[in-house]
């Protein structure tokens, strides 16, 4: 026989926290960051259930450890891509985000975590341009983009996925990715209509890129199938490929592991690391602590719209404020 601490009982339970209507309201207003109609691109943001997993209390530190081989990765020189400076967002009398500041550098994987209602979805919507900030500034490569809409942020190098998927049900996996390549076309619409040589050459280039992406995310075997025929985990990988089709410098992944089993999460972790190897930065918003601790270089923690901690995974695991935010205090 053995005794479990209160923390261990909480960590072992499927700790569903209260549903946050504010997060849901903001989610409903957001579209796909590739400047496509959300009804046709198939990425719609909905609030998910919180599944609290191991990795935050001291008694569970040995169970979830950051991937050791990350420390040996030789990182190229970094530049600051994204910077939030004292960003706040109010919805009526509710302050969803308060004075949030953090940065994402090139070739970096950053995690954004927090309990339900902590402001994660609002923060991602602010970064992507789905909603404007009430105050503060958002910088992209030292350019203030706080007032730019989604359509103007994508060409600068941002792309994102959303919590749930809504796909072009009758199109193929490959064509879904091709649909998202439109931001990379440089020829005029008239050139495309008249089927000029330059237009045909660019179409060929985008087709080759889409084929590469479908193989990169592991969907080569189902490239010719309709999107409605593939599994839920495959659909999430398809959303990542769709975002990558815009050739971003930073990709925002909003709960990419939702609904995945352990084997699928492991494959997702490997994919995120391979995305970084392609020269991209990644901002991961996720509830699954095992995934966050495995892939992230740094983690920012939110609670009630404010940043309460920031640091390396091993530092976040031991942070008293983080433990209290998730578990209501140390027992």
Image: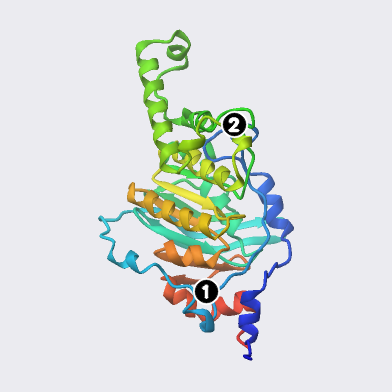
Across and down, in percent, residue 164 comes to 63, 47
Mark sitting on residue 226: 2
Tell me if I can see residue 83 in this picture: yes
Specify few, some or many for label 1: CA neighbours under 10 Å numbering under 14, 14-19, or 20 or more: many
Q: Quadrant of the C terminus?
A: bottom right
Q: Are marks 1 and 2 in contact (CB under 8 Å)?
A: no
- Indicate the secondary structure of the residue bearing disc 1: loop
Q: Is residue 131 visible?
A: no
| Residue 135: mark in rendering | none
Furthest-front residue in this view: 1
Residue drawn at x 60%, y 65% is: 305
Q: Is residue 37 above or below residue 262?
A: above
Where does label 1 land, which residue? 55
Task: Return the x and y of residue 221 as percentages of the image width and height.
Answer: 48, 37
Tell me the quarter of the picture where residue 51 sits.
bottom right
Q: Position of residue 98 (x, y in %)?
A: 58, 64
Q: Front-most of 221 and 64?
A: 221
């Amino acid at each position: 026989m053995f005794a479990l601490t209160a923390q261990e009982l909480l960590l072992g339970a499927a700790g569903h926290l209260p549903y946050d209507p504010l997060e849901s309201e903001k989610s409903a207003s957001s579209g796909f960051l590739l400047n496509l109609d959300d009804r046709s691109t198939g990425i719609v943001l909905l609030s998910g259930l919180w599944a609290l997993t191991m990795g935050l209390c001291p008694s569970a530190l040995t169970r979830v450890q950051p991937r050791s081989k990350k420390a040996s990765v030789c990182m190229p020189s970094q530049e600051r891509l994204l910077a939030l400076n004292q960003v706040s967002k109010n919805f009526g009398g509710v302050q969803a985000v308060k004075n949030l500041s953090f940065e994402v550098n090139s070739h970096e994987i950053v995690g954004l975590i927090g309990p339900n209602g902590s402001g994660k979805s609002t923060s991602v919507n602010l970064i992507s341009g789905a909603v404007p900030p009430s105050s503060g500034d958002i910088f992209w490569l030292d350019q203030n983009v706080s007032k730019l809409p989604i359509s103007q942020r994508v060409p600068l190098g941002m792309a994102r996925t959303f919590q749930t998927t809504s796909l072009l049900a009758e199109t193929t996996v490959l064509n879904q990715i091709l649909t998202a390549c439109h931001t990379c076309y440089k020829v005029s619409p008239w050139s495309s209509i008249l089927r000029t040589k330059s237009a045909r050459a660019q179409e060929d280039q985008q087709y080759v890129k889409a084929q590469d992406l479908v193989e990169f995310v592991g969907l080569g075997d189902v490239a010719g199938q309709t999107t409605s025929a593939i599994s839920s985990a495959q659909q999430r990988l398809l959303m990542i490929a769709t975002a990558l089709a815009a050739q971003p410098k930073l990709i925002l992944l909003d709960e990419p592991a939702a609904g995945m089993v352990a084997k699928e999460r492991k494959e997702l972790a490997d994919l995120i690391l391979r995305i970084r190897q392609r020269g991209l930065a990644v901002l991961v918003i996720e509830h699954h602590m095992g995934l966050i601790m495995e892939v992230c270089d740094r983690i920012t923690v939110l609670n009630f719209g404010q940043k309460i901690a920031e640091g390396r995974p091993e530092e976040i695991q031991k942070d008293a404020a983080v433990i209290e935010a998730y578990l209501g205090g140390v027992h």
